[in-house]
């Protein structure tokens, strides 16, 4: 089992999901460092945070803004797919061709890229237009 998958599965165990009961884990690799995160719900749903963003924000909070790889995992029929907000955050911190692995707990996975997840993403370059 890959280091990222192991970290994402461990993070998933800490998901706070009293409303949806839909636990998600994610792990980000930056060089040889791994940052993980789980989804955290709130009774006010808009204040919840996805696993992908939890892991990415952990890496950014540690001083890293150029991330290398992401794996996200959930108990879904096929590989789990990031929401739109996570896709935008992924596009901010990963190169367009970075490896993004979408997986489920059954062992299915699909590799993609930030560019494929969010073609035409809004970026800092758009702010200078």
Image: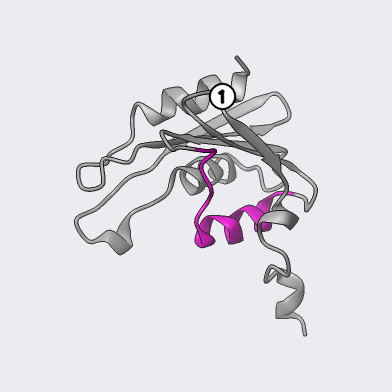
Inspect the magenta stretch and tell me whether residue 86 lies in it.
yes
Rendered residue at 66%/55% (across/down): 117
Rendered residue at 60%/61% (across/down): 88
84 with respect to 22 (left or right): right
Q: Quadrant of the C terminus?
A: bottom right
43 with respect to 68 (left or right): left
Highlighted range, magenta: 78-94
Counting from the top left corner in percent of width and height, residue 23 is at 35, 37
Q: Residue furthest top?
A: 1
Q: Is residue 49 above or below residue 119?
A: above
For disc 1, the marked residue is: 5
Q: Residue furthest front?
A: 77
Question: How are the colours assigned in the image?
Answer: one colour
Q: Is residue 15 above or below residue 61?
A: above
Q: Residue furthest bottom?
A: 129
Q: Is residue 10 above or below residue 45?
A: above
Counting from the top left corner in percent of width and height, residue 48 is at 33, 54
Q: Quadrant of the N terminus?
A: top right
Counting from the top left corner in percent of width and height, residue 2 is at 63, 18
Inspect the magenta stretch and tell me whether residue 110 lies in it.
no
Could you say which quadrant of the image residue 28 lies in?
top right
Q: Secondary structure at mark 1?
A: helix
Counting from the top left corner in percent of width and height, residue 124 is at 71, 70
Rendered residue at 50%/49% (across/down): 53
Q: Residues within 10 Å of mark 1 (few under 14, many from 20)?
A: many
Could you say which quadrant of the image residue 98 lies in?
top right
Q: Residue furthest right?
A: 97
- Number of numbered discs present? 1
């Amino acid at each position: 089992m890959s280091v990222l998958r192991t970290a994402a599965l461990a993070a998933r165990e800490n998901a706070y999901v009293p409303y949806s009961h839909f636990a998600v884990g994610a792990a980000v690799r930056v060089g040889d460092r791994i940052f993980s995160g789980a989804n955290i719900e709130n009774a006010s749903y808009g204040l919840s945070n996805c696993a992908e963003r939890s892991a990415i924000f952990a890496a950014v909070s540690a001083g890293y803004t150029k991330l290398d790889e992401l794996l996200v995992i959930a108990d879904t029929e096929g590989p789990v797919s990031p929401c739109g907000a996570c896709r935008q955050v992924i596009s901010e911190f990963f190169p367009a061709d970075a490896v993004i692995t979408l997986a489920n707990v059954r062992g299915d996975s699909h590799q993609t890229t930030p560019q494929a997840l969010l073609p035409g993403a809004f970026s800092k370059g758009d702010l200078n237009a």
